Amino acid sequence: MTSITKPAVRHPGLERNSLGLTKRDYEGSMSTLCAGCGHDSVTAALIQAFFELDIPPHRAAKMSGIGCSSKTTAYLLSQSHGFNSVHGRMPSVATGANAANKDLHYIGISGDGDSLSIGLGQLCHAIRRNVNMLYVLENNGVYGLTKGQFSASADIGSTLKGGEPNAQPPIDPVLLALNLGATFVARSFSGDKSQLVPILKAGLLHKGFALVDVISPCVSFNDHDGSTKSYRYTREHHVDIAPVDFVPLQSEISARTQPGSTTSVTMHDGSVVRFRSVGEDYDPTDRDGAYGFVRAHQAKGEVVTGLLYIEQSGADMHAVSKTVERPLVDLPFDELCPGSAALDDLMQEFR
Amino acid sequence: MTSITKPAVRHPGLERNSLGLTKRDYEGSMSTLCAGCGHDSVTAALIQAFFELDIPPHRAAKMSGIGCSSKTTAYLLSQSHGFNSVHGRMPSVATGANAANKDLHYIGISGDGDSLSIGLGQLCHAIRRNVNMLYVLENNGVYGLTKGQFSASADIGSTLKGGEPNAQPPIDPVLLALNLGATFVARSFSGDKSQLVPILKAGLLHKGFALVDVISPCVSFNDHDGSTKSYRYTREHHVDIAPVDFVPLQSEISARTQPGSTTSVTMHDGSVVRFRSVGEDYDPTDRDGAYGFVRAHQAKGEVVTGLLYIEQSGADMHAVSKTVERPLVDLPFDELCPGSAALDDLMQEFR
Amino acid sequence: MSSVNDFAFKIATVNGTGSASANSLLMQSIFRMGIPVSGKNIFPSNIQGLPTWYEIRVSEHGYTARPNEIDMVVALNPATYARDVANIRPGGYLLYDSSWPLDAALARPGINILGVPFGAMCVEAFQGDRPRTLMRNIAYAGALAALLDIDLMVIEALLHEKFARKKALLDSNHKAIRLGYDYAKANFACPLPFHLKHMDATRDYVLLDGNTAAALGCLYAGATVGAWYPITPATSLMEAFKDFCQRYRVDADGRKRFCIVQAEDELAAAGIVIGASWAGARSFTSTAGPGISLMQEFIGLAYYADVPAVFFDIQRTGPSTGMPTRTQQADLLSIAYASHGDTKHIALFPANPEECFYMATEAFDLAERFQTPVFVVSDLDIGMNDWMCRRLTWDDNYRPDRGKVLSAEEVAALPKFSRYVDVEGDGIAPRTLPGVHPKGAYFTRGSGHDRHGAYTEDAAAYRDVVDRLAKKLALAAEAVPAPEIVTQPNAEIGIVSLGGCHAAVIEALDRLRDQGVACDYLRVRGFPFAASIGEFLKSHSQVFVVEQNRDAQLRSLLTLETGVARDRMTPVLDYGGLPLTAEHVVRAVISQTVGAAV
Amino acid sequence: MSSVNDFAFKIATVNGTGSASANSLLMQSIFRMGIPVSGKNIFPSNIQGLPTWYEIRVSEHGYTARPNEIDMVVALNPATYARDVANIRPGGYLLYDSSWPLDAALARPGINILGVPFGAMCVEAFQGDRPRTLMRNIAYAGALAALLDIDLMVIEALLHEKFARKKALLDSNHKAIRLGYDYAKANFACPLPFHLKHMDATRDYVLLDGNTAAALGCLYAGATVGAWYPITPATSLMEAFKDFCQRYRVDADGRKRFCIVQAEDELAAAGIVIGASWAGARSFTSTAGPGISLMQEFIGLAYYADVPAVFFDIQRTGPSTGMPTRTQQADLLSIAYASHGDTKHIALFPANPEECFYMATEAFDLAERFQTPVFVVSDLDIGMNDWMCRRLTWDDNYRPDRGKVLSAEEVAALPKFSRYVDVEGDGIAPRTLPGVHPKGAYFTRGSGHDRHGAYTEDAAAYRDVVDRLAKKLALAAEAVPAPEIVTQPNAEIGIVSLGGCHAAVIEALDRLRDQGVACDYLRVRGFPFAASIGEFLKSHSQVFVVEQNRDAQLRSLLTLETGVARDRMTPVLDYGGLPLTAEHVVRAVISQTVGAAV
Ligand SMILES: Cc1ncc(C[n+]2csc(CCOP(=O)(O)OP(=O)(O)O)c2C)c(N)n1
Ligand SMILES: Cc1ncc(C[n+]2csc(CCOP(=O)(O)OP(=O)(O)O)c2C)c(N)n1
Ligand code: SF4
Ligand code: SF4
Ligand SMILES: [Mg+2]
Ligand SMILES: [Mg+2]
């Protein structure tokens, strides 16, 4: 039950963040996923990211659709509101919640079926609106919860457990997002926490839609040889463009602007994302460059991972619609209702 | 009424195609669109293409959704079946019809609202399936039939009649199609029939999903200064990568393999698409090259038009699903029903 | 047969030629003369070039329903000459453009034919095609002014207001009016037997369409998030809301106290409304039948997860795309029990723009109080036509009923918060908003859940929640707007109706009484049905249910919800897509009344 | 209390541990012993690690409904010990894994507790975690064989068939069976008071689930295009169809005489079915409640445009996502009048897998004959559980009823083809298929159209079409499967039910009769309702309507369609998500029967 409040008794042994909270305070109910499911690692990484960013749990909102991946919002942040909506439609629900209260940290957790089949239209339009949220796509190439049919992210030639190969071109959420103007695009691997956590932290602080495509193997239906979304295949074929360090605002300036560090991007709140030893040919602020880079490696059968593109100038949904600074939910009624006098005047115009 | 059969009396004056049909035989009922609407020019170009390709009208099927653009299927080919379905869902209806009867020429006519907002998911998945059809997207940047709201193809900064500028990044159907693995991608302009007709002809004979994005201005709601989908703006900013000639199989070999012609692509049925004087830098069979080329020109505020990408190797939906040569609708019942003996045997397995 | 302030005329033109302004000029002038007037715009689902009509009815008694007969037709669209001229009552009048010889189709015996060379006069008087076409419309308004005795002063005043800052337009309009007016004066015996005389019956009224009124209601209710996908006839509601917000909800620095999202489709619009309401905003969408079908899945989620949400359904003629510019009341069943599984939803049925305003605000109160979807079921006739209705007023003491929403303090004070516990026994469980307090956190889901919001597949835990929902909806019956009941001394016949039919039914009641058929009347204003509705049905030996659909959907709801047998109620149906006339109701009742004095 | 061939036992395990094969081994063995048996799989919406149960009922009388009480529980899931042990009838038996000391939760007085060290024995006998877990299941099957007298020969035979080509597996299974069997024989008084004896009551039967049967029906009906989006419990229908097609519809060269499209969602699946049917193929989709909600818009299009389409709704517990692995009959209303506007749809209600097969073929005939959507309304219990039903047979003389489809010659012979003309007065207008003949071309649209298929906004032309549709659906009432009616001498009580409730109701009828309460029974098999249904209702002083939903949806349909007053029918509802028991029906009837002999 997600509504149980954690026991007040503190575990002295546990590390605490600046809020005095331990990681436990960021955990959720017991996972009911298969032992070894990639999704559970992503949940752990998210807990880590929230903990390290000192975000008060109740200031986060967990949004999801339907699927094993979508279930995971119950397995973290039991002190945050969660909304497990309907299949493929989480982006719209998150858009509405964000429109109403822009000051919460929205995390959307979805799967490749939820996002690329039934939910493709909503995902694309949430990207266009640059809704301020971290969108984690737990990508395993199959529909896990319905027992392993191909999803739209299955690569050509990748086989089902039964051996049946996929013959349709995959939809790559990373390329799609770059194409549609997403302002934060990353790909990672549930098996690489050191890469995933800083990316999630950057995504959480990014002001706009942050898409993180996480290859998250399904041990029950898509982790066999022949699958291109298995642990083994991913380990062997993913290339990390550059490890990133996420340096939050709080930390002393020096650390943020450490000389000699190659590329680094300063975010809205002043935090810095630093790319360590990124290759000459790679510029994480060049949208088309990123697109070409990913494609080129795909041609070689490689899966590029890392924080592939980040743009801090893009206006998010509220900036575009010029809403007031305060969340709309906080506006007092008298700032919303023009009152009787105004109505009387108005009526004159309808004569 | 689309079901009126044309008068038997022939108009001696009118040019005839190899079927002995005149253009009149490819026309439909009177258009009810606004005078000057780009869509009417596209209708005319389609009539021209069908006429020149000598396609028996009743072997074509006209599929559409809802919108001014979608209405146009009534304005051509009155001797073809037409299906004006529901808003944004034509791709699935066309997919089903094609699954049932692969031997008809399917043309889908849609608008930017129909295809890129409510219908985005279906369009993307029809592309993935490489459904064998010509898909014409009559793109005017607005919802015409509902009186001029922005559509998802509106460019940033483009204004509504009232002056309101669009602030969301556009969805470019051409880039989207290239990204999703479309096997035939073109962009044209309703005002340039000489470019449009051969492209439509090639699209009709292409074995797979042929996307033709046609800038087709809405004179009532989006043809003003400030609009980037107006006649004026399009005329001034579109660059044709290369005029194409479409040389049908029928014509004598020499014409098809005329020496000196730069790039040329031979299609499934043996017809040839010849690109005249295409620039050094452009290869219409290079997917990523095409993507980069379009993006580069967009950066300069230019709209690239022409047959941008064509791939003849891609397997269409039926090739992928290995269906029989004959259309499924033509299979006799006894080839479909295993019969009583088989059932009796089968029952043994359920004991 | 002469009549003052009691007649109707119809103008037939081609859409996209700008006749709208001429027609509203006529409407407004008559209205400002203090005479009750109503107009019905019968337009095509098309932007330019197809037939369109405008019917104006003048009624000193204040009847606003669609006219029972047409006294005069202004025929300016050759494509519909035959139909239009056939519309004129025997002895009525035809006004046509005599720039061209009288078309054979117009030459009907038994009517009076008046020709005015509108086209020719305008070609002579104005430059350019567009101005000439536009002014031709104003010219017929001028001719009608003369024929019907519309006060020229009033017209002039309106033109001055409208074109205060556009001198050139003012002049040409003025000129066009005179062209028609003078020609008519000079050539015909003005006024016609039926014409206008100043009254003082519109002082407390306005001319308003339902969508504008509903948008005002949303503004006044404090709605901040609007999500929609354009669709006729619902588009003008959200567009009006946007305009009002631009006017009343923009800070000095240009920042907005509202957020309107044009969604990619209706599914998304519903999702946005649900997400925004869940987060604590008052949020709504406006749509039509096809949207209602597409929102079914989300509606079920909101119902099952106790999430408030307000939906405006501006009904049009179905099924499927149907006739987008024609009216109907055929979405009742698909709304009442929307979505798969066991569901039931609150619905409000405004009868006119005035009620659209008040019911819009009420919808938000009910949605938040009952934590469930609420539908305001309007239609094209109410939503898009200008109705004469009382000036809207506002009580500044109104405070929104946000329902049971726990504050941070209240949550903190709880030993433990469980989302779906029926604390007060009314089926409504206190909710918390995200971001308020860690102890208030809970998990909202459309999957099986127990009273704590936890996932369950247990039969008892599942029933516990859905039984509460059933109870909640049952209690809503007496909270929704009560039915309007009009009785007559010892009437044995009862007439039941809803929404836009009201105007025609109250007119029919008068005419039936005059014909010796006394009927009581009940107008359903909310769903689930209050007990009084069942009582009304049971207390009348014969009941007619008047509605605008083919399958008697209101009668179906009455049958299911009150338990009164289906055949105890006689359906009176009109589903061709045009607003209902009193005549239709009267004929149906008379012809089927057991021993009616006919 | 001893009983032969008449008892029930329940196995509680954790999902994903492979108990399924052990359970079906038990089912099949009993079945092959000639004894009527049925099994209910009660599983979680999850892939691995949550509680799951399997109930097996043995009934010499052939009752297949869910058992009224549990004689023995095999408790192998500590997480549910308490619940499971509470399930055992007084004096019943508990079988647990004594590898560990008896858990306090299991120590219930008044029952017999038998411990077998399944875990320990398997750890000793097998290598590796997975084999050990799997074989532990086979071991309890072995123990049950001894306790219940299941014929070991039969079990061995089944193992040999199953592992014919897998020697190693055969051996380990054989070994595991013996482990359990021998231990039980050695330690307990076998057999228990309730046990099995060979019969000869299953010779003409098979063990079949409804989705497999429905898939076979589609195969035999000649369906060529299947479109779907995965959803429990409908997934196995399309997957079975695919397997059968792979087996019976592949040419020598590997080319397929079918096309199955896994759509991107349910909206697309519906569109594909409509497109394929429009083009002339027999096409269908299989889905569950959420899909029905998402398909609403397309359903209205097919209805209004006269396009055939077959939908299988394998109902699960709603609303919204609800409980995907629990059963219910709560989509009735959203199917009967699906989509906005005035609509009504044909629906068939199979009661078991056998009917799933026959009704599947019938659905295609009806869809093409009436040119309209047809729904086969099944549910999770019928669709996914193994039912004992008569061997399916096929009449080779069957020819599909394609309805009024004009050939090229017929079209050519016509002076003019108009799509929506009611030539024969049955409301069904002849259609043409694309590609057949230029003269047969017409325009299919969901927008307003006249009898020629031309766009219209004219009231009369619009009514002409929708009135024909109403007529067509009215005539369908006598064409859908007739209700099954079972009468008893001078019974005054009538019981009405549908679908999967049938098994429990017929058992209840017997028990009620034994208790002196004679009831007639009508099982609804199709919608719209045949006249005989209304007559049945009217001819009984008291009527009970048994169904699995909260809101008495079948009763609602009966109220609306037959005119019989709602309260003339007493609802008997069960909506917790588990299959209905006879006990539930008997109790409801007895307790509410006017002067019942209790
Ligand atoms: C409308 C609807 N259709 C279908 C389903 C069934 N369904 C549940 S989850 C799912 C796919 C999940 O795949 P994905 O999003 O990749 O999540 P995963 O389980 O692989 O993590 C489907 C089809 C549903 N719940 N709702
Ligand atoms: C489900 C649904 N929602 C909304 C509408 C209203 N509608 C009709 S056409 C249209 C948009 C058309 O835009 P586009 O596809 O660009 O066509 P255009 O008119 O611009 O050619 C909309 C929103 C509808 N018919 N159905
Ligand atoms: S089925 Fe796959 S995706 Fe689902 S929980 Fe198991 S491993 Fe994870
Ligand atoms: S409104 Fe625009 S798109 Fe529609 S017909 Fe007119 S010009 Fe064309
Ligand atoms: Mg997945
Ligand atoms: Mg458009």
Image (spheres, coloured by chain):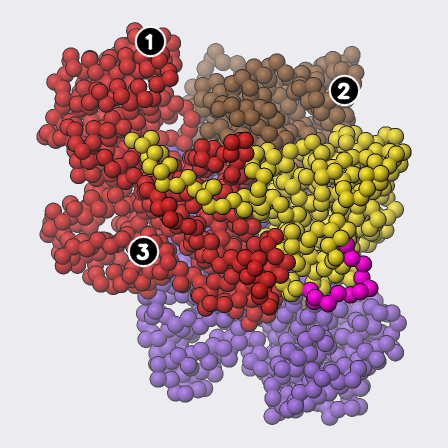
Chain colours: A brown, B yellow, C purple, D red
Mark 1 chain: D
What residue is shown with label 3?
D482
Give the residue displayed 62% in from the left and 81% down from the top.
Answer: C87
Q: Are marks 2 and 1 on the same chain?
A: no
What secondary structure is found at the residue carrying circle 3? loop
Overall secondary structure of the magenta section: loop
* Eye-nearest disc, 2 or 3: 3
As drawn, is D318 to the left or to the right of A92? left
Residue D501 shows in the view = yes
* Marked residue nearer the N-terminal end (3 or 1): 1
Mark 2 residue type: Tyr
* Eye-nearest disc, 2 or 1: 1
Mark 3 chain: D
Q: Alpha carbon of mark 2 to alpha carbon of mark 3: how far?
A: 71 Å
The reply to whether the C-beta atoms of the residues labelled 2 and 3 are less than 8 Å apart is no
What secondary structure is found at the residue carrying circle 1? loop
Mark 2 chain: A
Q: 10 Å neighbourhood of mark 1: few (<14), some, or many (≥20)?
A: some
Query: Magenta segment: does it hold C8?
Result: no
Please determine whether, in this image, residue D592 is positioned above or below residue A203: below
As drawn, is C103 to the left or to the right of C175? left
Please determine whether, in this image, residue C405 is positioned above or below residue A277: below
In this view, the residue in front, A66 or C166, is A66
Q: Which residues are magenta?
A: B6-17
Q: Quadrant of the C terminus of chain C?
A: bottom left
What residue is shown with label 2?
A282
What residue is shown with label 1?
D126
Q: Alpha carbon of mark 3 to alpha carbon of mark 1: how far?
A: 56 Å
